[in-house]
Amino acid sequence: MPSSLPALIAAIADPERSWPCRSQAQIFLAQPLVPAYRVPSRRRLGERIVRLADAVGVLAERLDRLPDAYRHWQEFDAGAFFDLRPSQLGAMLRIERLGATLDVTLHADLLSPAFRSAERFWAQQFCPAYFAAGHSSEDTDAFGHHFGKVVVPAMRRRLEVARLEIAAAGNLLYQRASMVFLVAAAAPDERERHVQQLPPGDEDLAGLFDRLPCLTLSRSIDLLPHSTGVPR
């Protein structure tokens, strides 16, 4: 289930690896977001970009405080610290322990309304249409025609809107010189995590993938000075 734009592009490029397709965005929105993370989907693009940058900035600030705050918890409660409900934690948060280091990743693309729209369309429309079409030709088969002429162009439009929204919010955060965002920004790591899922030999897709915007945030915590357990 894709939680970032690079993950979504990789899933689209190789649908066979993603079946059955389930929407991470649908899970993410199963419970209402707190006001700080809400980005109105029906506002003008400029306002959505500002609100998205603000929301990602809030996450980045909390992630920046995590190493100091973590040691004060007897048992760390990630939901309370990040102000995320259980369904949102499951979709957005990834925690990996490597020896004495704890890597905490937040998939902030999920805060983008355009990304959620594209991801839901992928799960609910693109994947079923792809497998219904199979290997049929769009010129001779109704399922193939629907997939090639209707679903694929619609998927591309949604991806382009998501790309623009995420890129604009990231650029705004860079323009603000938000140090907490700059320190935590993990777009290269997120792309590297999913690049191996791309079909081999497609240099155009690989070049596009390397330029994908992404709002994923990440922070490593040294556990040696701390006695608390792994975050839950």
Image (cartoon, helix red, strand yellow):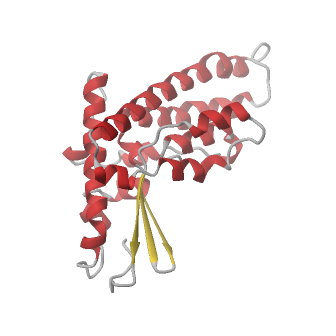
Q: Position of residue 163 (x, y in %)?
A: 47, 31
Q: Position of residue 139 (x, y in %)?
A: 77, 13
Which residue lies most toward the top here? Answer: 139
Closer to the camera in the image, 22 or 168: 168
Image quarter of residue 44: top left
Closer to the camera in the image, 201 or 75: 201
Q: Is residue 40 visible?
A: no
Q: Is residue 157 visible?
A: yes
Q: Residue at x 34, y 40 (%)?
A: 174
In this figure, what is the number of numbered marks? 0
Q: Position of residue 15 (x, y in %)?
A: 67, 40
Q: Residue at x 77, y 18 (%)?
A: 141
131 vs 175, left or right, is: right
Image quarter of residue 49: top left
Q: Position of residue 55 (x, y in %)?
A: 27, 44
Q: Is residue 106 above or below residue 144?
A: below
Q: Is residue 127 above or below residue 24?
A: above
